[in-house]
Image (tube, rainbow, N blue to C red):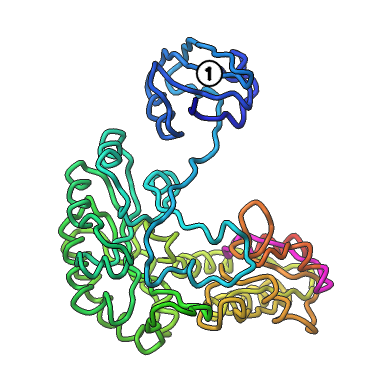
Amino acid sequence: MKGLVIQTVTPGSIADELGVEAGDRLLAIDGRPLRDIIDYSYHTAAEEELLLEVAKPDGELWELEIQREPGEPFGLTFAAPEPARCRNNCVFCFVHQLPKGLRKPLYVKDEDYRLSFLNGNYVTLANLKPAEVRRIVTQRLSPLYISVHVTNPALREHLLGTRGIPPILEQLRQLAGARIVMHTQVVLCPGLNDGPELERTVADLAALHPAVQSLAVVPLGLTRHRRGLPRLEPVDGEYARRFVETWQPRAKALKKRLGEPFLFLADEFYLKAGLPFPALREYGDLPQIENGVGLVALFLRDAARVLRTARPMKRCRLTVVTGVSAFGFVAEFLEKLGEKAGVEIRAVAVENRLFGESVTVCGLVAGNDIISALRGSEIGSALLVPDVMLKEGEGVFLDDLSVGELGERLGCRVICFEATPRGCYGAIREIAI
């Protein structure tokens, strides 16, 4: 008996009226066994009359005939599927570079096409079986987010640390033939998949447009915990400058040829190089924003809007923490906001001691690193922390320090805010009005 364990039942819903309860197990719909929530969504998408097979915790089996209005929900929620584990041994894998003592889920590597469809997780497709390809095509699991890294088969096996994997281009062509939309990425490793190899990869993927809708190139991340791992060259400021100067014109040329933005360079390249960012319009509908592409351009646009509407507030002193790479544009926004609102706002760039100084992004700042950066300093009325530093819904940092513990150890009020100019402005207004 498998099926799906029901987590919640909406009061007054169809399922509630039929006596379905949390803890029951939905086994099948119209005789079709359910493997996961994708099956559930697929088999309930359009039908108005359905037969549900439900197992009660005591083993009793129910058959429920349901009639509903078009699009009327049943009122059921389920747990996300347990992810398939990644069997790759990528030379640049960030999980392999984590220190000991972090939250256990951080050490789990997933490689599951279902989570790519449901959550936008990037997968390599290295473990994809023919039956799973058929399911993707049949159930129209689109879009998918795919880590290509390089289209050269031998080099891709080296980068993924896995032998005998399916050729990625064959997989992408099969999915493209079925009109599955794909967003792709390359984690750039200097000296390995850059130069002519990147040129080949970009050309191969552009040839599959529009099925392959976008390609993001992001620099590899290296921590100070790379003991016993292959030596890799970092993306430093000079490399990033040359890379942007070479590839930004090529991205523009591809946009002109394909009729829409296709190739995107991660924000981190521009930050490391100290070069100006493309206009927000160059990022299209921001298909790769969760991959760190276009975040800065969007921040700058939204910051300008906030500054146009900001109003004077009660005078007070505040401290806002951010990552090293974001410090320049965040500090500039906060200085202008403070001048317009009459509030003293100090921006602090938190050096990453947990992973090493080469890791500069805001989302990987640990709670104890904030304490090290602020210990003994005057914080003011409150410390503002962007929510990207915290595990969603739990209020803890990567090193398991909670927001409450951070406030106790620094002896100050801590307020978390949505990591946008509007979110920061709203948090400041709550304090200063």
Quarter of the rendering containing residue 236: bottom left
Residue nearest the viewer, comparing 63 with 183: 63
Which residue: 61% across, 54% down? 392
User: Disc 1 marks which amino acid?
Assistant: Val
Query: Crowding at label 1, few (<14), some or many (≥20) Cα neighbours within 10 Å?
Result: many
Q: Is residue 200 left or right of residue 350?
A: left
Q: Is residue 248 left or right of residue 285?
A: left
- Magenta segment: does it hold 20? no
The picture places residue 149, in percent across and down from the top left corner, at 29, 66
Residue nearest the viewer, comparing 169 with 99: 99
SS type, badge 1: strand
Residue nearest the viewer, comparing 305 with 188: 188
Quarter of the rendering containing residue 378: bottom right
- Magenta segment: does it hold 421? yes
Kindly identify which residue carries mark 1. Answer: 54
Start and end of the magenta stretch? 408-424
The picture places residue 302, in percent across and down from the top left corner, at 51, 64
Image quarter hosting the C terminus: bottom right
The picture places residue 108, in percent across and down from the top left corner, at 51, 57
The picture places residue 409, in percent across and down from the top left corner, at 81, 72
Quarter of the rendering containing residue 56: top right
Which residue: 62% across, 80% down? 353
Relative vertical location of residue 78 with respect to residue 164 in this rendering, above or below: above
Q: Is residue 320 left or right of residue 136?
A: right
